[in-house]
Image (cartoon, rainbow, N blue to C red):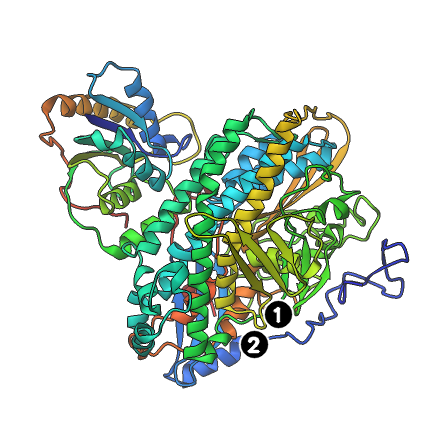
Amino acid sequence: MCFKNLPVEFDSEGRAYLREDVRDPYAMERSPDLNGSAVQTLSRDQIEDLLARNGHIQKKDFDPVTRVAGALAFHSVVDLEERKILESRSVATLFRGYEIIMMGRDPRDAIYITSRACGVCGGTHSGTSALATEMALGIKPPPLGIVLRNMLSVLEYLLDLPLHLFMLTGPDYSENVIRKTNPELWSHAERTEAPHANVHGYATIGEIMRDMNALSGSLYLEALHMTRVAKEAYAVIGAKFPHPQTMVPGGVSTTVSISTFNEVYLRLQQFFDYSKKCAAIYDDLCDFFYDANPRYREVGRTPANLIDLGVWDDPEAYDASYENCNEWGERRWATPGVIVNGELVTTKLQNINLGLEEFIEHSFYEGWDGHRFETDPLGAPLSPYHPWNKDTKPRPQAPNWREKYTWATSPRWDRMPMDAEATARMWNTAAARLLPENPYIEPTGHSLKILIPQGEMPEMELEWYIPEVWNALERNRGRAYCVAYTAVVGMNIWRQGMELLKEGRDAVSTPFDIPQKGQQLGVGFWGAGRGYVSHHMMIEDGVVTNYQIVTPSTINASPRDPWGTPGMYEIAVLNSPILEESSAESFQGIDIQRTIRSFDPCMPCTTHIHTDRGVITREVNTCACGADD
Amino acid sequence: MILVAGVGYQHLSDLSFGPKLVERLRGLDWPDDVRVEDFGYGPIAILDWFEESPGKKFERAILAGAVERGRTPGTLVTYAWLESSPDPELVQERVSEALTGVISLDNLLIVAQHFGALPPNSSVVELEPVEKEWGSELSAPCEERLEEAVEWIRREVHSGGGHTGNGRHKEVRNT
């Protein structure tokens, strides 16, 4: 049984049903059991009192949080004497609105419109909307179409991961930052030998940090170059990046040959050595911080509650149906799953879907009435707060910490806050041990062994271990290993594609029609480079009548839920000690910034956001600190 | 060679001045050494473009787009982009935006300047937009500015890059 809070149980054949002894099964009166992972929060009155009475307790606001995609602000209250954080609030400052833009449109528009939700993972949204449409309309793509879509995701992640590791979060660990915030740590780094010097070529940790300097460091510049390599390969199949032109329901709209695969391989193989280097650098960095001060294990620590839908379909198993989603989901190169307090509780896509609810008590939206679908298409119980039942009703207003303060909603799984992560992909896969046999990846139950082919460096086996503590450094280490994992999944997919071509199975798409009558439901279960992405779609009489997108940053940046439990950014910051050595006057909040950036925030709103005052085409700053107390 | 490029998103009324200008310029005859490009995409990808041939061959560039700076709506400003080193924090901020999907003339100028991609002789054509809503057409005043911009670019191309601009001769940034 995977649910502890939702009153959903399973019969002997694994079919979900609602417990009969619960009168109002989805009522909010009962506080959920957070499995011992509840976080202490102070009330607004307590915070205000502390601020009024103590000069060393101060507000620290980041508006915007820089080096993240899109518009995110963060409000915190810090105790600079006790070196701890007393309050944290995550604020998505712009309304995305793609759910509203999609209303009344031809379902085929979704691949192009939802792609624009993000300037990095547009292809993910395009592909996820294709999956939702395929499920709604019963379209099964041919194997090569599935393989090519898988490859597009591989290449998108190979852009996204280095971007995060060395251009967005990387500078937080650079010489320039550490000299300013923790001068003693910098001196120590200069003297500390790097254990993996034979892989990455840096003799000391200080040398690594120097090359992580923004704009000038060679690791920064190399990452910039690698994003280009990934984009070039992406464009070979997708025609352009970040909004592919060839991703369609039913497969892809491009023809391919062995030359296409060779063009992709020439780029993919450049990630073999690069991925060895990424893992070695982050291993050395993480271990250095732990050795220098074990309290770095507490920076960004959260309960290990992770959610992921899995990615990279088996071309012979995926049939787009909800009926078979558990089977084809578990055949993916990344296993779907939910981790609660470090334990894998399900790998079934249907269960993940049933447990998902989205709350708006602290978000700039109105609630909705009714319970449109009491069950999913297989008859399993569905919450009124499930995306298939949700209506998006924006209600702009002044932020107020006691009430509503963000455009992000509060997605919860089994009423618990979750972390949507690239690393969740590896964690689920390692723990579930469901991966098909292959030459490159071996899950052991507690780790993932990744065999990276020879480049200029020899073949190398990396082993990523499920971490004992889940914190900012492990999120970054996980993403570093994810480069290797993604690259060798790319090799598996590449070999599948070549095999299909050899067999003459070169069809890439399945034609389909949009029925002009009736109601159809679909959901795309997929992931961005950062993690979890779902699109829930309802079609009626040929047009979209409901469309709901949940992204990793919706999950991670969520505000407090109806029971007062903070979202993951907020929990992670509350749990962080302040290890920065700066005085109150020069306080940078680097531990807070490292924590937030470790989630690889992507507030998907960088293009064409409409407000009452016109269209916004680049990030604008609001003032979170102006929120009414 | 001379590069003439428009920067901006599509279908955003006057904010699409750059792409609209490119459309108009492509319908005209130009000397063989003039290349008209649509730069309606991310500045980092444009850096990649500059690294490739013929990107490195340009001696001059004219970059055009709509930018909101609080001037009188419908104002057309032209100026020489003077070489100076942008503040590294500003560059990092703009690189992050560029990498995560924002298309903007300012970002392109700042990022390309930092990475040494801009030709030595570069000038800028900026429009202060009137209409900023969805729409495929320019407002009437900006339609007139489009024709003025075409004329200015034509003169600039034939003048040998003497910077006949009417605007600020200093680094710019959004405020």
Q: Is residue A398 visible in this depiction of the protein?
A: no
Q: Chain of mark 1?
A: A
According to the picture, the residue beneath numbered tag 1 turns out to be A564
* Cβ atoms at labels 1 and 2 below 8 Å apart: yes
Q: Residue at x 24, y 41 (%)?
A: B71
What amino acid is at disc 1?
Answer: Gly
Helix, strand or loop for disc 1: loop
Pointer 2 local density, CA inside 10 Å: few below 14, some 14–19, many at least 20: some
Q: Position of residue A465 (x, y in %)?
A: 58, 65
Q: Residue at x 19, y 26 (%)?
A: B2
Image height of A6 relative to A191, above or below = above
Q: Chain of mark 2?
A: A
Q: Quadrant of residue A40?
A: bottom right
Q: Position of residue A601 (x, y in %)?
A: 48, 56
Q: Residue at x 15, y 48 (%)?
A: B84
* In this rendering, position of residue A204 left or right of residue A451: left
Image height of A195 relative to A255, above or below = below
According to the picture, the residue beneath numbered tag 2 turns out to be A41
Q: Position of residue A405 (x, y in %)?
A: 51, 61
The answer to which of B51 and B171 lies nearer the viewer is: B51
Mark 1 and mark 2 lie on one chain; the one further toward the N terminus is: 2
The answer to which of A629 and A349 lies nearer the viewer is: A349
